[in-house]
Image (tube, grey):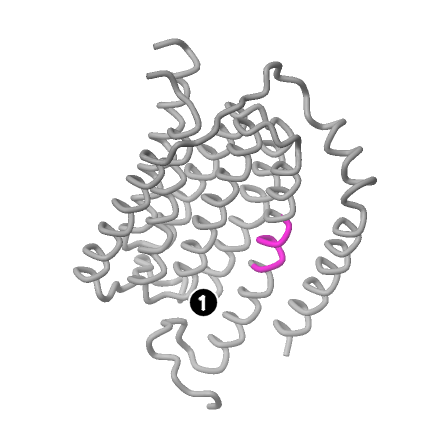
């Protein structure tokens, strides 16, 4: 077991355990903060997969943007004077049985499949490569994403202030 | 057994299952959104892992980047809708929202 494996197990334990807390915690604000650790763990996994740019984007966009949005949503849709912001759960037993079976099937399929593994030999910084791809092969998707973001921004603002 | 593709796929399967569990069991619409974010993260781990271990070039990284952008747009729109629902119906519990109009 080398250092890479130890770091992988640390980050994956952080990710999975805090995701479990996210889905079982009854306090929404606590769940949002556990989600922070999940996103950090996923960013760590990206670093281990030699995806440095994606890891930084994950930190900036998810932790800095989406999580803040979610916490704002929690605060605006609950009475803040209430100390306890709780949420109910329904269908727990059928959900646990169904999801347990589903996860078991998924993991056994993943483990038993014969993947053709052909890893990249050398690990290099990806930012320059991604930038080049983004303005050459993926230029159309890049521009479309810009338009989608603009539409989403205008749409969200006009929906929310009605 | 050294860490390889399967380990990352197992982690992303677990994340996906937790996200699905949150979507099924939570009443609060914002918790359902958190479940969706977990599922999108699981998909992203898969994309980047296959890109690393399959030697497909860097397309997987770019798809993961696009998914992150779409997740940001989705979160913004969804929260605007949730705020509107709260303004109109004073609740965000998805099992109580069964009217199309007030």
Residue A93 at what x, y percent from top left? 16, 60
Report if residue B73 lies within the magenta region.
yes
Residue A125 at what x, y percent from top left? 68, 21
Residue A27 at what x, y percent from top left? 31, 54
Say above or below: A63 vs A41.
below
Q: Main secondary structure of the magenta part?
A: helix
Determine the residue located farthest toward the left in the rendered image: A93
Q: Which stretch is magenta?
A: B69-74
Which residue is label 1 attached to? A77
Residue A41 at what x, y percent from top left? 44, 32
The one nearer the camera, B97 or B5, is B5
In percent of the image, x 30 and y 60: which residue is there?
A86
The one nearer the camera, B97 or A52, is A52
Give left or right: position of A160 versus A133.
left
In percent of the image, x 49 and y 45: which residue is there?
B43
* Quarter the C terminus of chain A occupies: bottom right
């Amino acid at each position: 077991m080398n250092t890479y494996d130890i770091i992988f197990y640390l980050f994956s334990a952080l990710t999975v355990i805090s995701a479990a807390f996210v889905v079982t915690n009854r306090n929404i604000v606590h769940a949002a903060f556990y989600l922070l650790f999940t996103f950090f763990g996923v960013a760590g996994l990206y670093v281990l997969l030699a995806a440095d740019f994606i890891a930084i984007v994950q930190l900036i966009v998810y932790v800095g943007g989406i999580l803040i949005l979610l916490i704002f949503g929690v605060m605006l849709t609950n009475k803040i004077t209430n100390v306890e912001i709780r949420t109910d759960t329904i269908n727990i037993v059928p959900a646990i049985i169904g999801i347990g079976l589903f996860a078991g099937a998924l993991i056994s399929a993943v483990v038993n499949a014969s993947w053709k593994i052909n890893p990249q030999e050398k690990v290099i910084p990806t930012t320059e490569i991604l930038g080049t791809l983004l303005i050459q092969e993926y230029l159309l998707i890049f521009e479309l994403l810009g338009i989608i973001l603009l539409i989403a921004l205008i749409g969200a603002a006009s929906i929310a202030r009605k | 057994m050294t860490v390889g593709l399967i380990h990352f796929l197992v982690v992303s399967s677990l994340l996906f299952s937790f996200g699905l569990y949150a979507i099924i069991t939570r009443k609060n619409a914002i918790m359902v959104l958190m479940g969706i974010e977990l599922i999108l993260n699981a998909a992203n781990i898969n994309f980047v892992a296959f890109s690393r271990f399959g030697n497909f070039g860097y397309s997987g990284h770019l798809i993961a980047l696009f998914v992150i952008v779409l997740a940001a747009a989705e979160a913004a729109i969804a929260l605007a809708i949730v705020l509107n629902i709260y303004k109109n119906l004073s609740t965000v519990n998805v099992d109580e929202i069964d009217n199309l109009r007030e």
